[in-house]
Image (cartoon, rainbow, N blue to C red):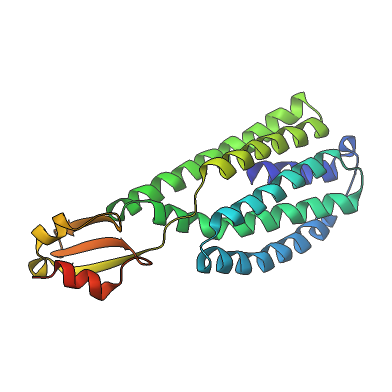
Amino acid sequence: MTAAFVIIPVFLTQPEYGFNWEKSELWMVYVPAMIAGLIAMGPAAVFGEKRNIPKQIFMVSIVLFTASFVMMGLTSSSGVFITAVIFFFVAFNMMEPLVQSMISKFAKVHQKGAALGIANSAAYFFTFIGGTFAGLYLDISSRETLGLTIGGIALAWLIFTAVKMKNPIRHSHLIIPENEVDFDKLNTLESEHIAEWFINETEKVVVIKYVSEKLNEDDLKGKILI
């Protein structure tokens, strides 16, 4: 994201990169790109969450990221460059709403705060890295090389996502007062459909994370209540 925000205005306003726009004209790129990104955000979030296909949404986004940087690097047409920027904003806005949700779903219940904190810290750090990389790389390379380099990184990201990433299992959480739980039953319960459980000592409750498609709340209560 930061690399894109560095290179887009530089490419368009500095004549050595082939365009020579005025700074006052940049709105003609950013306004349609922002509108397209906002329109894409809603359906991506709905499909990603309701149909539980965030991996597929991520992969579509990464394809658009790859195409956008390659197009920004190679094109000499203002129209194609604007299309590339639109691709970038659409990709970013499709992916962004799902990132925090994915972190929460994969993290353990009692580690969500830590997981989100680490993820946000990493995001801020690489925001700095992205802007620094783009600025320094422009000094030693061309627009074409920078576009292809970032496009190549995005392509590697796409392959990694296709191979390694999995859609999260749908889980629900059952919260029961601690004094109502038979821990012998809970400990002996077959665990393939229970991801984890822990005792919240502060509130004196047991939190159970279970696969909602395999167990319903009433059945689970019947197996573990005193």
Q: Position of residue 63 (x, y in %)?
A: 70, 48
Residue depicted at 46% across the width and 48% down the height: 120
Relative to 68, 156 lies left or right? left
Confirm whether residue 23 shows in the render.
no
Residue depicted at 66% across the width and 40% down the height: 154
Does 16 appear above or below 189? above
Place residue 14 in its image quadrant.
top right
Q: Position of residue 179 (x, y in %)?
A: 7, 68
The residue lying toward the viewer, choosing from 10 and 96, is 96
Relative to 36, 119 lies left or right? left
Place residue 224 in its image quadrant.
bottom left
The quadrant of the picture occupied by the C terminus is bottom left
Residue depicted at 76% across the width and 47% down the height: 68
The residue lying toward the viewer, choosing from 12 and 99, is 99
Q: Position of residue 206 (x, y in %)?
A: 18, 63
Residue depicted at 20% across the width and 56% down the height: 198
